[in-house]
Image (cartoon, coloured by chain):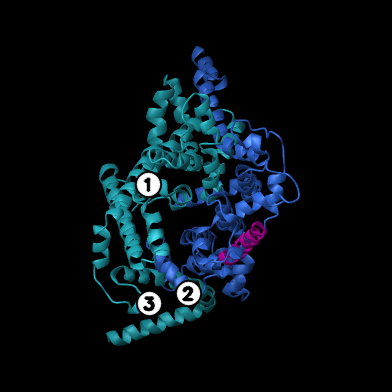
Amino acid sequence: MTAIRSRARAKGLARRYWDCRYLVVLMAPGMLYFIVFKYIPIYGLTIAFKDYNFADGILKSPWVGLDVFRELFASPSFWEVFRNTVVIASLTFAFGFPAPIILALLLNEVRSARFKKTVQTISYLPYFVSWVILGGLFLQFLSPSSGPVNYVIKALGGEPIFFLGDARWFRGVLVATGIWKSAGWGSIIYLAALSSIDSELYEAAEIDGAGRWAKMRSITLPSLAPVITIMLILATGQLVEDNFDQVFNMYNVAVYSVGDVLSTYMYRSGLEDMEYSLATAMGLFKNVLAFAIVLLSNAISKRINEFGIW
Amino acid sequence: MGRIGSTRRKSGSPDAFGAINGAFMVLLCACTLYPFLFIVASSLSSFNASAGGLSLIPRSFTTDNFARVLSDQLIYSGFENTIVRTVLGTGLSLIAVFALAYPLSKKYFPNRGFWTALIALTMFFSGGLIPTYLLVRGVGLVDSPWSLVLPELVSAYNLVIVRNYMQTIPDSLEESARIDGANDIAILFRIILPICKPIIATIALWVAVWHWNAWFDCLIYITKPAGEVLQLVMRRIVIQGSDQLTEMLGRGMAMQQDEYITPEGLKAATILVTTFPILCAYPFIQKYFVKGVMLGSIKG
């Protein structure tokens, strides 16, 4: 009975695929792409549990259980890199997260529509320029010998600072240039939320005698709260992430002790030192951690705000 | 009466806060633009201007920096490789995204949820750097321009956005064509794609800018300098200060006395040559990008 039913269902399914055979043909190459270029690499993660060697390849390299992870966690350089990642990400989060919100709030107070549009257009610009170019640009701009920043420092009687080569300054430069590049672009989403606030609310508050601060506290911020919460949850996932493009194009051996992060270390150990299993284990560790943090912050947000992404 | 008057004054004339805010905005724009303008000035200056200073007006104006950068062979091959990957990558990516999104937007497509989930899952889980690298090398794409196009052919995120857009198209539009005997593919081309024009433009721009700025895949998959994209050629000259830079500095020495050319000026010119196309396109593409952010955020 069940056999007949399931056969009938199977036949029905085949029939349904046949009915939209043109769609199947249309979709097949794209699905093949996902299987080859996305799912095979996911299977390739198994080399984090293997002792990968060229001769045997991914499939035949011998399994070693958790040995690679043990080696990774026993390595002091891994923990240094991990600490750098967390410190830089926390600084980026602490300063970088509020920046677009503040920018959006201030832009929202600009009355001239034309001026506002000009400021927006200019502030979005760095988002379109890659970190390769910006790395080169800041190398020039922050140069201790010919850069304008050090020109000002010298003119004020200070000693020139080698911003990109001095371990005391490097993290600050990463955070500052990160905000410089992305705060404008990040403000778009908040501006959209601000523009959807009913202006009658403000008018009513004004009639009640509310000042700028009162309006911001009781109308603007509560209206932004859902967007801020979503962005906050997404941002926590970035706490173990790092901006590879930025760090890779700005760091150098002199600042490895403070600036080398998981992804740059992974790149060097994987593609320069050919430690494939070790680098894969590092990547897997980072992804799992990031995913767990997002799930956790989502759960916390649900408990506090009764609101989450999932 | 008085209350209405005061409200009008508040929203009409600038107050102290407005003035400070306006000044802050001007300062912000200055901080954003100054580094770019400084590079422009430095690229047009000879040695005494690169020695430091804040001025944005090039002193002892020269176009020699550009002349030397533009006489470098790798800059041209870089441009060519970047254009090839951008055109090829954007074209193929559009075809693949729309070919996938259309079936997945159809409610009657069998196991639609499963296929969609299979794709959406790749937004959260990926093999990462090394497994992807081993795959690309394994299928023999190293040193082929396809290595810059195929591995990131379809972004699951773009696909979901296009599918959602297609789902908002009412079925009734297709029905008359279906009665006339048109098949799914004919309907896609005759009815769906013309309606999708705005989203096609948005996705095309996203992918094109992504390709124009991409460099890391080229760093790991392309081993020959002649195959490098512009961003990477620029990186080697400016960040790594390669032999190419030394060669540029020395070029023309035999012909004339020009020790006034400095590495700073040459690097600045290289940065500008690389950035110029994106700066030119920026005013036109910016608004489509802003629209795109909204598109993504409505569902997210």
Choose the circle earlier in sequence order: 3 or 2.
Answer: 2
Q: Which chain is blue?
A: B
Find the distance from the CA under tag 3 to the CA under tag 2: 22 Å
Q: Residue at x 41, y 21 (%)?
A: A210
Q: Give the SS element for disc 1.
A: helix
Res B79 quadrant in image: bottom right
Q: Residue at x 59, y 73 (%)?
A: B185
Q: Give the SS element for disc 3.
A: helix
- The amino acid at mark 3 is Gly
Q: Residues within 10 Å of mark 3 (few under 14, many from 20)?
A: some
Question: Residue A37: horizontal and vertical position, in percent?
Answer: 45, 70
Question: Residue B61: horizontal and vertical position, in percent?
Answer: 72, 37
> Is residue B109 at all visible to an observer of this figure?
no
Above or below residue B252? Residue A25 is: below
State the predominant SS element of the stretch in magenta.
helix
Is residue A160 a member of the stretch shown in magenta? no
Q: Mark 3 or mark 2: which is in front? A: 3
Return the mark for residue A57: 3
> Is residue A20 at all visible to an observer of this figure?
yes
* Residue carrying label 1: A235
- The amino acid at mark 1 is Ala
* A17 vs A120, nearest the viewer: A120
